[in-house]
Amino acid sequence: MKRKEPVGVVATIAITGLMLFSIPAIAQQPLKLSDPEVASVAVTANQIDIDYAQIALANSKNDDVLNFAKTMTNDHKAVIAQAVALVTKLKVTPQTNSLTKKLLDDAEKTKKELRPKKGKEFDKAYINNEVAYHKAVISVVETVLIPETDNSEVKSLLQNVVPALKTHLSHAEMLQKKIVE
């Protein structure tokens, strides 16, 4: 039997990029988060990718990488704005939780790895991280969130997000090939 999640929970997850987690981690640990906890994860997950992009803007000299980082910053800021509007509409106050803390801890490790890198070494590490991130996002949206969603508006939102995610992935993979060569 399908779990019925409140529309707010699924919508918040859908617009967040919660899929920073690996696919096996999601499959092994069912998401049992309250709306306030999901809101916290949503804002945190997007802010983390903005933080990575900000490191790219500081460390890279590659115009393609810089443009990609600017796109990630703008897109994730827009998602945060959507998440804030949604939690405001739902009258939900984000609540820090163990998942938020884990995301922040993992992000700190990644940022510590990225910060000292410069030039091509940085560009490769940053873009590899972004490729992996977008693959995870697409996979979770297509194989977990869309099939589990019964609300037609939420399902439509999820389906409409996938093409943009695939565009980001294609862009990141193109950069990855260009940087490796």
Image: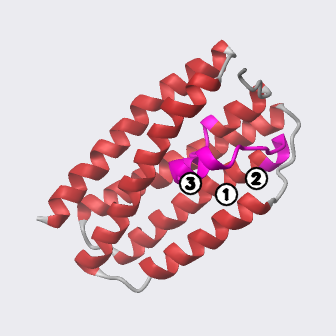
Q: Marks 1/3: CA distance?
A: 13 Å
Q: Which of marks 1 and 3 is nearer the N terminus?
A: 3
For numbered disc 3, what is the local secondary structure?
A: loop
Q: Where is residue 102 in the image (x, y as percent from the top left)?
A: 68, 66
Q: Given contact means CB atoms under 8 Å apart, are the residues at marks 2 and 1 in contact?
A: yes
**For this view, does 22 lie left or right of residue 114?**
right
| Residue closer to the observer: 143 or 8 | 143
**Residue 150 position by quadrant:** top right
Vertical position of residue 121 compared to residue 45: above or below = below
Q: Which residue is drawn at 40% across and 29% down?
A: 163
Label 3 belongs to which residue? Answer: 21
Question: Magenta residues, as a range?
Answer: 14-37
Task: Report the residue marked by disc 2.
Answer: 40
Q: What residue type is labelled 1?
A: Thr
Residue type marked 2: Ser
Q: Find residue 179 and report its horizontal and vertical position in percent.
A: 19, 64
Which residue appears at 84% of the width and 43% of the height? Answer: 34
Look at the image and say whether residue 8 sits in the magenta stretch: no
Q: Residues within 10 Å of mark 2 (few under 14, many from 20)?
A: many
Residue of label 1: 44
Mark 2 secondary-structure assignment: helix
Is residue 8 left or right of 42 when viewed as pictured?
right
Indicate yes or no whether the magenta region holds residue 30.
Answer: yes
- Nearer to us: label 3 or label 2: 3
Seen from the viewer's position, the closer of residues 140 and 175 is 140
- Distance from disc 3 to disc 2, alpha carbons, whole Å, reads 15 Å
Picture layout, residue 170 above or below residue 115: above
Regarding mark 1 in the picture, which secondary structure is present there? helix
Q: Image quarter for residue 103?
A: bottom right
Above or below 118: residue 29: above
